[in-house]
Amino acid sequence: MVGMQPVHAQKLNMDKEQADQFVYDCLNNHIDSLYELSELKVIPSKLTKTAERSVFILPGGYYQIKTLRSDCYVKKSRGDYQAICDKRYPMETFNNQLLNLAENGHLMQLKHHQYGQKLPMVRTSLKSIFALFLPTMKPYVSVTSVKEDEMEAILVFHHPKLDFIHMLTLKTSISGLLKKGNVIYGDLYTNIPQDNLKSILDK
């Protein structure tokens, strides 16, 4: 299945123009809308307390900048820990959804920044993005803005061995977070050297 193969220029022996087009084609074909959630392993001794008694942070790593992280937010209920997916916690929910640790049915409408200044629109699902990138890459998230009914976030997929990234800058409504078919809007940058991250974020 194409969605479970590594997607990057180096592995596929493509130049960047060809690799960008390959990602675009895969995502427009909704390669796998049934991709399962990533496994959540909670070790209570590693949890970090928050201001709310039953809410904890399960620390992950970070990528290049301390705010771009793989931390998960969990809630303790009846002695068990679950990844937060609750309208009362919009930032924590969005963070967990973008790490594929909380249920989501989001659709994506993305401007795909391709080689040669091409900017086609990608219409796909968040689960298709996970199916395409997660088998070989690590995700990191930063929720950068929380307003009355809108949130913005950065989602980066990093290939640890080949050291390149795919990056998404995203915007969605808070009221749609738990609604199947909610649309997330944003920009997609693919097959970029990891040392270009900060220059893109500064734009």
Image (cartoon, rainbow, N blue to C red):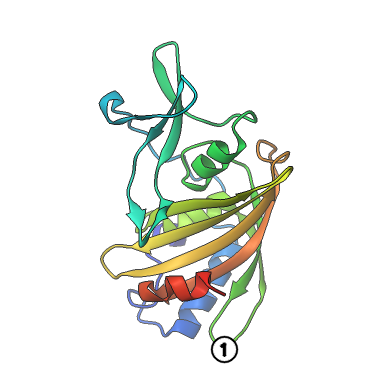
Q: Which residue is mark 1?
A: 116
Relative to 173, is 21 on the left or the right?
left
Q: Is residue 176 visible?
A: yes
Front one among 185 and 202: 202
> Residue 62: horizontal and vertical position, in percent?
35, 53
Relative to 8, is 152 on the left or the right?
right
Task: Reply above or below: 132 against 20.
Answer: above
Front one among 151 and 155: 151
> Residue 110: horizontal and vertical position, in percent?
65, 64
Label 1 neighbourhood size at 10 Å, few (<14), some (14-19), many (20+)? Answer: few
The answer to which quarter of the image holds residue 134 is bottom left
Quadrant in which the C terminus appears? bottom right
Front one among 35 and 134: 134
Q: Is residue 1 visible?
A: no
Task: Reply above or below: 171 against 7.
Answer: above
Q: Among all residues in the image, which is located at the extreme top?
A: 78
Which residue is pictured at 61% across the width and 57% down the height?
170
Which residue is pictured at 50% across the width and 40% down the height?
96
Tell me the SS state at disc 1.
loop
Task: Reply above or below: 25 against 152.
Answer: below
Q: Amino acid at mark 1?
A: Gly
> Residue 86: horizontal and vertical position, in percent?
60, 29
> Residue 91: horizontal and vertical position, in percent?
57, 40
